[in-house]
Amino acid sequence: MLNTEKSWLVYIIEASDHSLYTGITKDMPRRWQQHLNGTGAKFFRGRKPLNLKFLESEHTRSTASQREAAIKKLGRQAKLKLINECFSKLDQNLLSMPLDSEA
C-alpha cells in the first residue's frame, strides 16, 4: 500500500505579471491546468501561470499548509532567494549524480 500521508507538495509559480504565487497540492499537473484554465485560485483570474519556480515534496497536509503560510509571509526578495537556493541545491545534486545508467 502506498504511503499517501506525505504526498503533499508546496509550490511557487511565477505569473504572467511576474508576481509569485504559493500553493499546495497533491497533483501538480492537475493543479497547473486548473490555474491555466482560471478554475484554480482566484489569484490566476486575469493572470496566467508562466513557470513553476519552486517545488517541495514529502509534506503531510498539515506541514504543507504550515510551509505555504510561512512562504506567503516572505517578501518577494526572500522568495526569490528561496527559489535560487533550491536551484543551487538541485544543481549540486545533479552534478554529483552518476552519468551512466549502470552506476
Image (cartoon, rainbow, N blue to C red):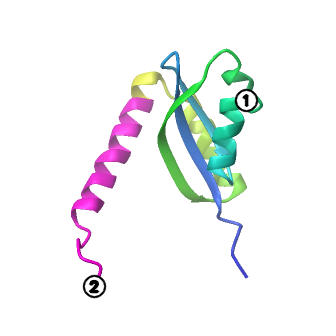
Task: Please determine whether, in this image, residue 52 is positioned above or below residue 100.
Answer: above
Residue at screen point 22% across, 61% down: 95
Question: Percent position (x, y) of residue 78?
Answer: 41, 29
In the visual, does 67 lie left or right of 88?
A: right
The three-letter code of the residue at mark 1 reads Ala
Q: Majority secondary structure of the magenta segment?
A: helix
In the image, is residue 36 part of the stretch drawn in magenta?
A: no
Task: Please determine whether, in this image, residue 80 is positioned above or below residue 26.
Answer: above
In the visual, does 82 lie left or right of 16?
A: left
Q: Which residues are magenta?
A: 79-103
Q: Secondary structure at mark 2?
A: loop
Could you tell me which quadrant the N terminus lies in? bottom right
Q: For mark 1, what is the residue?
A: 41
Q: For mark 2, what is the residue?
A: 102
Task: Please determine whether, in this image, residue 13 is positioned above or below residue 96.
Answer: above
Residue at screen point 63% across, 40% down: 32
Query: Could you say which disc has been placed on residue 27 in the image?
Result: none
Instruction: State which tag comes first along the sequence, 2 or 1.
Output: 1
Could you tell me which quadrant the C terminus lies in? bottom left
